[in-house]
C-alpha cells in the first residue's frame, strides 16, 4: 500500500452548477428546522393535540437529524456520495409528502423522524462538495454561497412559516419541499460526481458499534437539551438519567472510534490545530446564532406583544444583513487575512449584542431592525472565514468526514445555546423579580405614593376595587421589568463571549492544505 501525492481533484462540470445542485436541497432541509415553529398551535389544534405534544414535531426532527449528521461522510464513503445524496433528497421529499398528509400527531412525528434521517446528511455533504469543487483561493465564494443557506434559512423560516400558515395551511409548510426536492435531485444526477478517493474506500466495513453509540449518545443529549427547561432540568429524574446515559454513550463512542481503522467519525482529525479550533468556534457560532434566534422572538412576543407573523417579519432584517455580507465577504477573503475577518466579525457581533442589551420597553420596531441588520452582516464575517480556516490544513480526502464532525458540533452548539440562554433568561428574571419586589414594601413612601396615584386614577375611571387592580398593575410592571433586565443580562454575556473569541482568531494557521493522498 503506497501513498502518492496527486493533484487536487476537480469536478468535470462547472463549480457553480454543482453548487446550485447541492444548495437547493440543503436550503430546503435547513429551512425545515425552523419553518414549523410558529405553526405549532395550528398543528396542535388541527390534530387534536396540546401545544406541548405538538413540540415533538420539532424535537423528533432535530433528534433524527443530529443522529445521522455525523455519519454522512462515512455513509458517502460506503455507498458513494452521489448515490447517498440522491437517497437523502428522495427520502426527505417523500417524507415531506407524508408530513403534509398526516391525520394524527403520531403519523406526523413518524414522518418528521424520516424527514430528519433524510435531511441530516445534506449539510455536511454539500459543504464537502463545495470545498472540493473550488480551489482554495476561491473557497471564500463557495462558503459564502453555502452560508446563504445555512445562516439565512433558519432566520427567514419563521417568517415564511407564519405567512404560509396564515394564508394557506400548515400542510403547505411541507408540500413546498416537493418541487424543490425534485429539481435538486434532477440537477444532482446531472452534475454531481464522486471523487476518486471516495471510490477507493467503498469497500470499508460498516462500523455498527460506533454508529449505535453515537446515535444513542447524541439522541439522548438532544432530548435532554430540548426538554430540560420544560422539566426543570436535574430536578427531573428523566433528565438526570438522560444526561448520565448520554455522557456514558458519548465517552464510549470516543474511545471506540479512536481504536477503529475505519471509524464512522474520524475523531483523529481534531488533532489538526485549525480543524480542532474551528470546530470549537463552530459550536460557539451555533450557540450564538440559534440561541439569539430563539431569544429575540421571546423578547418581541413576551415584552413587546408582537404576534407570530410580525415577530418573524421583525427578524427578517437579520437575514438581509447576512445575505449582503455573504456577497461581500466572499469577494474579500482572497484579499484580506481570514483571521482578521474572523476577529472583525466577532467584534462586530459583540457591538450589536451590546446595542441589544440596551433596549427598553419604549422602542419602535426600527430600534430592533437596525441592530439585527448589523448582527446578520457580522455573522457572514464569522461564518465564511471560520469554515475556510477550519478546512485549510486538511487533505482533500479528509474533508468529507471533517464536514460531518464540524456540522454536528455546530448543531449541538446551537442546541446547547438555545437551552442555556432560555434557561438563563428565565432564571435571571426570577432573581430580578425578587430584587424588585423587595423594594415594594408598606414602609416605602415612593411605592405607597405610586400605588395611591394609580388607585385613584382607576377609581375615577370606574374600575371596581381600584386598590386591588392597582396592585395587579404594579406586579405586571415588575414582571416586565424583571424580564427586560434578564434579557439585558443574557445579551451582555453574549458580548463577553464574542469579545473573548475575537483575539483567539489569530491562533489559526494560514497554511495551505497538504496535498491529497490516494491509497493505491
Image (cartoon, rainbow, N blue to C red):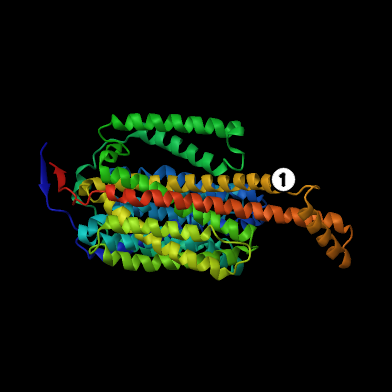
Looking at the picture, tell me which residue is in the foreground, 341 or 122: 341
Q: In this view, does 5 lie to the left or right of 22?
A: left
- Report which residue position mark 1 lands on: 438
**Number of numbered markers:** 1
Q: Is residue 450 left or right of residue 46?
A: right
Q: Is residue 247 above or below residue 73?
A: above
Q: Check the picture and name the quadrant holding the N terminus.
A: top left
Looking at the picture, tell me which residue is in the foreground, 131 or 514: 514
Which residue is depicted at the point 48% across and 44% down? 416
**Residue 152's quadrant in the figure?**
bottom left
Q: Is residue 276 visible?
A: yes
Looking at the picture, tell me which residue is in the foreground, 347 or 94: 347
Indicate the position of residue 185 as horizontal and vertical percent values. Answer: 35, 60
Q: Can residue 179 be seen in this view?
A: no
Indicate the position of residue 147 as horizontal and vertical percent values. Answer: 36, 60
Which residue is depicted at the point 28% across and 29% down? 259
Which residue is depicted at the point 57% across and 40% down? 228
Indicate the position of residue 36 as horizontal and vertical percent values. Answer: 54, 57
Q: Is residue 508 above or below residue 93?
A: above
Q: Check the picture and name the quadrant holding the C terminus.
A: top left
Q: In this view, does 500 lie to the left or right of 8?
A: right
Q: Is mark 1 on a helix, strand or loop?
A: loop
Q: Residues within 10 Å of mark 1 (few under 14, many from 20)?
A: few
Indicate the position of residue 43 as horizontal and vertical percent values. Answer: 62, 56
Amino acid at each position: 500500500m503506497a501513498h502518492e501525492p496527486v493533484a487536487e481533484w476537480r469536478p468535470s462540470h462547472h463549480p457553480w452548477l454543482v453548487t446550485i445542485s447541492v444548495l437547493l436541497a440543503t436550503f430546503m432541509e435547513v429551512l425545515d428546522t425552523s419553518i414549523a415553529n410558529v405553526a405549532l398551535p395550528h398543528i396542535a389544534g388541527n390534530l387534536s393535540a396540546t401545544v406541548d405534544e405538538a413540540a415533538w414535531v420539532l424535537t423528533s426532527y432535530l433528534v433524527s437529524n443530529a443522529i445521522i449528521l455525523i455519519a454522512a461522510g462515512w455513509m458517502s464513503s460506503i455507498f458513494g456520495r452521489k448515490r447517498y445524496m440522491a437517497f437523502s433528497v428522495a427520502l426527505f421529499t417523500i417524507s415531506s409528502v407524508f408530513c403534509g398528509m398526516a391525520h394524527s400527531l403520531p403519523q406526523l412525528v413518524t414522518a418528521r423522524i424520516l424527514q430528519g434521517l433524510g435531511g441530516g446528511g445534506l449539510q455536511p455533504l454539500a459543504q464537502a462538495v463545495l470545498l472540493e469543487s473550488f480551489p482554495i483561493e476561491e473557497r471564500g465564494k463557495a462558503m459564502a454561497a453555502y452560508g446563504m443557506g445555512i445562516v439565512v434559512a433558519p432566520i427567514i423560516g419563521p417568517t415564511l412559516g407564519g405567512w404560509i400558515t396564515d394564508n394557506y395551511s400548515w400542510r403547505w409548510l411541507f408540500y413546498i419541499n416537493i418541487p424543490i426536492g425534485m429539481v435538486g435531485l434532477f440537477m444532482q444526477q446531472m452534475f454531481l460526481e464522486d471523487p476518486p478517493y471516495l471510490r477507493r474506500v467503498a469497500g470499508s466495513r460498516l462500523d455498527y458499534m460506533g454508529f449505535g453509540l453515537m446515535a444513542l449518545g447524541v439522541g439522548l443529549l438532544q432530548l435532554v437539551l430540548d426538554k430540560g427547561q420544560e422539566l426543570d432540568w436535574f430536578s427531573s429524574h428523566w433528565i438526570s438519567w438522560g444526561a448520565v446515559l448520554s455522557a456514558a454513550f458519548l465517552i464510549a463512542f470516543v474511545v471506540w472510534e479512536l481504536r477503529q481503522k475505519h471509524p464512522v467519525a474520524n475523531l483523529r482529525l481534531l488533532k489538526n490545530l485549525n480543524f480542532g479550533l474551528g470546530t470549537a468556534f463552530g459550536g460557539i457560532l451555533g450557540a450564538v446564532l440559534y440561541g439569539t434566534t430563539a431569544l429575540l422572538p421571546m423578547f418581541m412576543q413576551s415584552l413587546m406583544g408582537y404576534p407570530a407573523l410580525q415577530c418573524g417579519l421583525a427578524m427578517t432584517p437579520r437575514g438581509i444583513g447576512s445575505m449582503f455580507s455573504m456577497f461581500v465577504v466572499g469577494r474579500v477573503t482572497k484579499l484580506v487575512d481570514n483571521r482578521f475577518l474572523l476577529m472583525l466579525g466577532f467584534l462586530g457581533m459583540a457591538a450589536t449584542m451590546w446595542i441589544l442589551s440596551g433596549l427598553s420597553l419604549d422602542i419602535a420596531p426600527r430600534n430592533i431592525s437596525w441592530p439585527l441588520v448589523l448582527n446578520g452582516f457580522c455573522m457572514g464575517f464569522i461564518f465564511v472565514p471560520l469554515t475556510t480556516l477550519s478546512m485549510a490544513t486538511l487533505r482533500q480526502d479528509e474533508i468529507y468526514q471533517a464536514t460531518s464532525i464540524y456540522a454536528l458540533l455546530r448543531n449541538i452548539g446551537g442546541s446547547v445555546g438555545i437551552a442555556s440562554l432560555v434557561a438563563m433568561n428565565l432564571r435571571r428574571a426570577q432573581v430580578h423579580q425578587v430584587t424588585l419586589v423587595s423594594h415594594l414594601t408598606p414602609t416605602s413612601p415612593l411605592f405607597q405614593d405610586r400605588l395611591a396615584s394609580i388607585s385613584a386614577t382607576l377609581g375615577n375611571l370606574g374600575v371596581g376595587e381600584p386598590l386591588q387592580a392597582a396592585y395587579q398593575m404594579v406586579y405586571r410592571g415588575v414582571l416586565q421589568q424583571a424580564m427586560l433586565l434578564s434579557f439585558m443580562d443574557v445579551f451582555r454575556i453574549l458580548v463577553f463571549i464574542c469579545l473573548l473569541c475575537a483575539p483567539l482568531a489569530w491562533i489559526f494557521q494560514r497554511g495551505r492544505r497538504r496535498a491529497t493522498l490516494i491509497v493505491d
